[in-house]
Image (cartoon, rainbow, N blue to C red):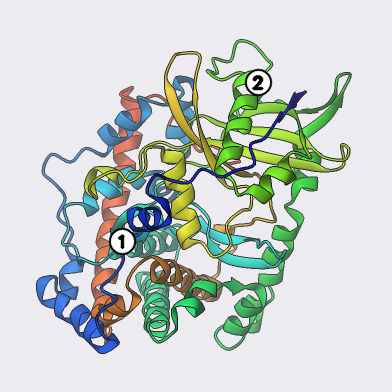
Amino acid sequence: MLGLGSIAWFPRIPAGGFTMFMTSSVRRPALSLAVTDRMAEGKALRKLTPRRSLATFQPASERDPVAILEAENATRVAQLVGLRHERMAESAFTFFRGGAAIMASDLATAPRSGIDVQLCGDAHLMNFGLFASRERRLVFDINDFDETDRGPFEWDLKRLAASFVVAGRALGYTPYEQELAVLDALGGYSTAMREFASWRNLDVWYSHFDVQAIFDHLRATIPKSAKKRVPDLIARAQRKDAMRALRKLTEETPDGLRIKSDPPIVVRLDESGHGILYTEEHLGQMVRDYVDSLPNDRHALLAQYEMIDTARKVVGVGSVGTRCFITLLTGRDDTDPLFLQVKQAEPSALEPYVGSRRYENHGERVVQGQRLIQATPDIFLGWTRSMGTDGNVRDFYLRQLHDQKASVILENLDLDLLRAYAKVCGWALARAHARSGDRILLAGYLGQSQVFEQAMTAFAFTYADQNEADHRALLDAMASGRVAGTPSPAPLD
């Protein structure tokens, strides 16, 4: 058993104090301007970057999507690279999910609005979902921040809009039906941003989308048949907690409660021959070090747990091959579990295109970005750094593995539910951008017409075509042996 050991009780304050911390972490808007002036300033930005110009997508002549994946693979677990390709090869949609770096390189060549916010960085429709707030209420929000960085607000929206076209095609919807879903997502964003522009700062900061608000929103917008499916998603989220993880991921052994191995998805760290560069001792030290990144009250809470077991766990699509682990901790007894996910944080896919690096530790970048734009972050969210047995230092962030979290099942989304889901995704993204950017400037740029939404919809369809071509390029590269993997469907965990 790996105890947490002694815990320091004082937080680390950055040199320069509170003021320096605020100014270095958040770019403040021109607050000295009156609201009407800031709205006018946003409108004036249309002359520099017309909203219609955001429809532009011109692939670079030397563009090679497979080469971008190969560059990412250079720092990943070699034995898992083939699995990553197989998951991406399953469909054009799974390829899109894993292709954040490809899209980032494409967005970098497009016209920019000049309005920066804290971006999710990978705002496709599967990176939204339900999870429990600190008050144990289910809320809807963005739930993936691996690529978060500061950049043009429209980059998140372009990825979101394109994901609805790609998903709509996967579900067999017509181009007209796909367009309806995209316009719902964009309209949800624009409507919410104009509303947020009229709110007080604290009202925006405290806003969140809980289950009751979702029901209130859906009641007037979708038919009864679609509304009946929402409770199923809520119930699935409520079931997905630490006790369910305990039943699913562990087993009783002669040595006590342990994580079950399920190679290559789950591999315990006390097993030999699996090529993992981090041992149980590494993970124990990571958890002890990570505590320094948490508020003091979490120190006292974590001190009541003992670390029992550790394993590597493959997650997602784009993250396959990064070093991701789970740790089992228990409290008063074996029926009081806490699962922490320890996930490697690599440079954001946006970093080459958005300017200087703001955080030395990429785990801190992920955590601070999530705290800034998510309404109710996980209470155990923190970061650390560790050197592997190969001598390389890597950044990590930690969070709970299961805390009443659930994402939509794509195949269950009929058109009515897809459109309703698009609206709430747009709202959640607008709230994130309103917290981290100048919502009044943004509302001025968006305007009241549908010019912005039409331009972004045109981009979404063009980019969905490009995504299909890129998916075929990966299949060809796998078939020719250029990259590892067999071009056949692979199950997702």
Q: How many numbered marks appear?
A: 2
Residues packed near mark 2 inside 10 Å, few (<14), some (14 to 19) or many (20 plus):
some
The residue carrying mark 1 is 27
Residue nearest the viewer, comparing 486 with 195: 195
> SS for tag 2?
helix
Q: Residue at x 65, y 55 (%)?
A: 405
- Compared to residue 290, the image places residue 53 above or below, namely below
Q: Which mark is residue 168?
A: none
The answer to whether one can see residue 355 in this image is yes
The residue carrying mark 2 is 280
**Where's the C terminus, which quadrant?**
top right
- Compared to residue 291, the image places residue 458 above or below, namely below
Residue 99 in the image: state x and y as whole percent.
Answer: 36, 44
Q: Which residue is drawn at 30% across and 60% down?
A: 155
The answer to whether one can see residue 90 in this image is no
> Outermost residue, front direction?
16
Residue 268 in the image: state x and y as whole percent.
Answer: 68, 23
Residue nearest the viewer, comparing 323 with 38: 38
Q: Residue at x 43, y 56 (%)?
A: 18
- Compared to residue 217, the image places residue 186 above or below, namely above
Residue 136 in the image: state x and y as whole percent.
Answer: 72, 63
Residue 282 in the image: state x and y as whole percent.
Answer: 59, 21
Give the residue type at disc 1: Arg
Give the residue type at disc 2: Glu
> SS for tag 1?
loop
User: Mark 1 or mark 2, which is nearer to you?
Assistant: 1
Residues packed near mark 1 inside 10 Å, few (<14), some (14 to 19) or many (20 plus):
some
Instruction: Give the mark, 1 or 2, whose residue is nearer the N terminus.
Output: 1
Q: How far apart are marks 1 and 2 (CA)?
A: 40 Å
216 with respect to 15 (left or right): right
